[in-house]
Amino acid sequence: MMNRQESDMMWKGSEGQYKKGRGAQWNTKNRFDRQEMVREHIEAIDDWTEISPNTVHIEQDAKSLVNKVDSPDVGMWYSMNPYQGCEHGCIYCYARNTHEYLGFSAGLDFEQKIVVKKNAAKLLRKFLMKPGWEVMPISLSGNTDCYQPAEQKYRITRSLLEVCREFQQPVGIITKNAAILRDIDVLKDLGSRKLLSVMVTITSLDEELRRKMEPRTTTAMQRMRIIRELSQAGIPTGVMIGPVIPGLNDHEMQKILGMAADHGAQFSSYTFVRLNGAIQLIFRDWLMKNFPDRADKVWHMIQDGHDGKVNDSRFGVRMKGEGRMAELIAQQFRKYSKKYDLNKELFRFDLNRFTIPRQQLSLF
């Protein structure tokens, strides 16, 4: 539950015209900042600079790329993210909180200030050449979408996939952007060697809801096209309903799973919405602005799935929730996944193909 101070801060921060094309409508306070600038009285400040709606790419030479994933309930062992921040603007995104470590806000900053790791491919090569590397799959987009709009300009995800192909390194991808189809050639090569699996996130088939909840993402039908074309190319592909938000999209589960299966999806997964840290304030503000007639109902249903709270950090329950609402959603997922023959076979990466190319050995 939010206290009075947090609630007041939320509404002060979100005054003004609704920013179309953005999920968050304001910048929440960075919990690591000791000072903040607050707009107390609009009419009394003449020189206040409004937040620009434009996206800024911050290019950097990163110090590291591949991270070991210690969380036992996310289904990945290692992850790499070529971009920090995400222009897709998904209002529920758990990765928003990580932007605070960079000195930015989890709100609009997360969508507008995108950190680009220009040297990502070089870092991956260096990592894979470590003598102690015990081959495990590495996940692209463990935090932010590797095929967000910045990829059209920088093509860093493409370069990482080419390195994986070079070393025959297993890789998993999760995305909601049709830009992935531009890389069908390298994806097909990896898929034919059991070195690749792809999860396509579909949160709603309702375009009005999708535009509000995920303002700069591709349509649900385009995501179905991704599943179809990847599957036809022999690439193991699944559908992720992430997150399920009771009162908004939970009723769509059967239709999403059924349609994804019809388009060639082989496996499925889901997460239950959780609103940790600043996301709680951002989401509540968005909910009140877009669905004032049912905002309280949705909020209470989320609480019902997290033992009276809207957030949860406990391994094992945080991704699926607990209680009556969470169990109802879990039952639906099991029922419809079985009905549409999803998750019948467990995909296994081939971990035995990994090799360090000769040219890399000579450089080493």
Image (cartoon, grey):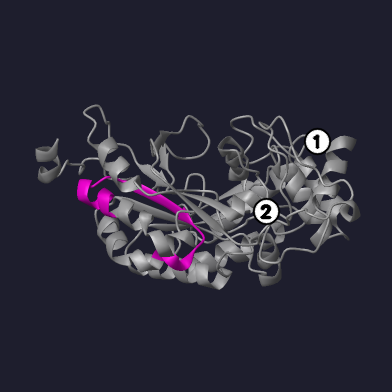
| Image location of residue 274, percent across then percent down | 68, 42
Q: Give the range drawn in magenta.
A: 162-180
**Residue visible at 44% across and 39% down?**
76
Label 2 Cα neighbours within 10 Å, binned few <14 / some 14-19 / many ≥20 = many
* Residue 253 appears in the rendering: yes
Residue highlighted by disc 1: 308
Q: Quadrant of residue 192?
A: bottom left
Crowding at mark 1 (Cα within 10 Å: few <14, some 14-19, many 20+):
some
Q: Residue 51 appears in which quarter of the rendering? A: bottom right
- Residue that mark 2 sits on: 91
319 lies left or right of 194: right
Type of amino acid under label 1: Gly
Q: What element carries label 1?
A: loop
**Residue farthest to the top, as pictured:** 132
Answer whether residue 348 is magenta in the image: no
Q: How far from the left and from the top, in percent, is residue 97? A: 62, 40
> If you read the primary sequence from the N terminus, does the residue marked by circle 1 or circle 2 appear first?
2
Report x, y in % for residue 267.
46, 55
Above/below status of 41 relative to 304: below
